[in-house]
Amino acid sequence: MKKIKNSIKIFTVALIAGCSLASCDLDLLPLNNVVLENFWKDKSDVDNVLRSCYVGMQSDYLHKIIVWGEVRSDNTDVGEDVSANLRHILKGNLKETNGECDWASIYTVINRCNTVIHYAPEVAEEDPNYTPSDLRITMAEARGLRALSYFYLIRSFKDVPFSFEASIDDSQNYVIPASKHENILDSLIMDVEECKDWAPRKYSDEQKNSGRITRCMLYSLLADMYLWKASNAELPQAEQAEAYKKCIEYCDRVINFKQDQYKVDEKGNLNRMMDTYVLSNYGYPLIAEKSSTSTSGAPAAYNAIFGEGNSYESLFELTYGHADADVKNTAVGEMYGYSTSKDSYRQLVACNSNIMTTAIESSKKNYNDQELFPVTTDYRSLYCFRFTDSGSYPILKYSISRFQDDQDFGTASTTWKVPSEKPQNMSGLRGERTAYAGWIIYRLTDVMLMRAEAEIELAGMMSPSVEWMDKEITTAYRDGATLSTAEDYYMDAFNIICAVYLRSNPSAQTQQTQSCPKLDSYTDYNSFVTLCENERRRELMFEGKRYYDLVRRARREGNTSHFAAQVASKFGEASKAVLIKMALMDFMYMPYAEAQLDVNPNLHQNPAYAEDEDIVKQ
């Protein structure tokens, strides 16, 4: 990692210059007036730098986590305007010279968090208006963002330089070796465990409620980290089981909070948004795709979650302002596509055409695990991307700000093509100046499916197979009864998956004998793993989750067989050569960037890329 040479005065100016979640009204001081003695004096100084931690995630940071978590997966392929660096990644030709390996923006946010954590307690001692409660909230936010940032790094690079110390002056040496990722993960879990209940339960402002760190966000992060910890094949089974149970515990905290929020419904607008079928039959309050206030089939849940943003289901998202002067979400806009003029459209990446090779016949209604989107009634197959006969699949998710109410979605007669053939003609396509889509990091269905995955893994440890006979899902599994047997865990996981699936298949709610998963089709561990993985892929497509899901499974299985089979599907003729490298577990992770290796002699290249490093340096 590059040695950070900024003194506190330079560091502070850099923070203030970009310091706002949507806008900033700070008085910027000239560089020569900003010194340590007149900064970090009161709560507002801490708040300004803390806001800069969020701001630091809005541009290159977001671009990188999309590349690392989504572009590397089997969900994406080359777009019409793809850059050279992304083309190399999409074709399996990743080297240390690729600019997408640069982790500087993530470490910038980490160092800002470290600096807040370093100075906030000192400011609290000086400023009587900075209460102990305020300080705890600050520390929870900074530590939560720091843990999230490191979590992205270890999932993407495996072992990375790790420090909780702020880089404040030139006397500190940050040319340090990489720490083992499992040790980093344990440190992050311990750190967040300590501060998890310091954050607010909720804010009165809906935007802050999902745009700032809350307890639900920290619970979601802990669930995610415990799920990753449990996926270590080298961990004793007892420790794996304990980590899966911790994952379930924190998922339950989030789910219970959302259920209580729905029941209280302080503003009186949640009840009319809910999918009443899913709620009454499966126990989860999810926003309905087919709104009860509309006679059309437009995807109301998509419009609320991805169009308007900061929805009831959102647990944490990067939020962008709508004013012309506000920071725009150029990372998503450029990556997935936006209109540059009336008849112009550009995108760096597209949907992998292997997801759908032919249009779904309107008469096809039977669910099966051999196809990702086996039925026409799944709204996600209509709003995530556009199928075209030419094989070019533009990504629609996040690019469309709102699907109009008069569009025909999710009916049995739907042909698997959105009415207009070109994305730029689609009503609601974001332009460069309206690229304000929030980026969702955690949402309710993600957490629900984490729980389902953990339950399936626990069940597999107990009994790899079950015999259902004529079992039906009962209210006991919906209402949080204590689960103890493999059958209990499998049944509850199936219940969760069905809830998520049926929210996105409103027409299938009355056709369950054909269009939904059938419990008696899943009688062993492997079948449940496939069911859960497919549902996570459908639900979280293009949200930066897929690649990490595949890596987590490979870690759990102790080999790259499944991972390689999925990812290599998009490499075409080059896949044979790439498959040889994919046999190495380390190939799943990014190489250290050449620039980091040049300035930090304590870093040693990922073994899977060592040969490439030698070739480059010759």
Image: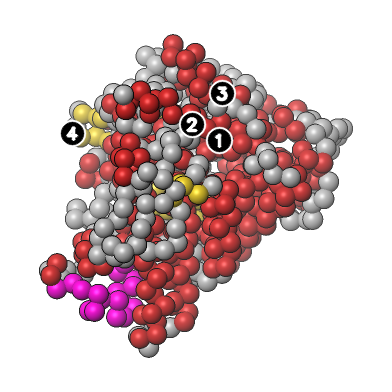
Q: Which of marks 2 and 4 is in front?
A: 2
The residue carrying mark 1 is 551
Label 2 or label 1, whichever comes before in sequence order: 1
Kindly identify the residue that appears in the image at 48 percent across and 29 percent down.
608
Kindly identify the residue that appears in the image at 54 percent across and 57 percent down.
188
Tell me the quadrant of the picture where the C terminus can be found: top left
Q: Which of 397 and 64 is in front in this view?
A: 64
Disc 3, SS = loop
Kindly identify the residue that appears in the image at 54 percent across and 68 percent down.
195
Label 3 or label 2, whichever comes before in sequence order: 3
Q: Distance between the residues labelled 1 and 4?
A: 39 Å
Image quadrant in which you'd find residue 29: bottom left
Label 1 or label 4, whichever comes before in sequence order: 4
Q: Is the magenta stretch mostly helix, strand or loop?
A: helix
Disc 2, SS = helix
The residue carrying mark 2 is 607
The residue carrying mark 4 is 341
Q: Which of 265 and 67 is in front in this view?
A: 67
Coordinates of residue 409 in the picture (x, y in percent): 47, 32
Label 4: few (<14), some (14–19) or many (≥20) C-alpha neighbours in 10 Å: few
Number of the label disc, if any, that sits on residue 300:
none
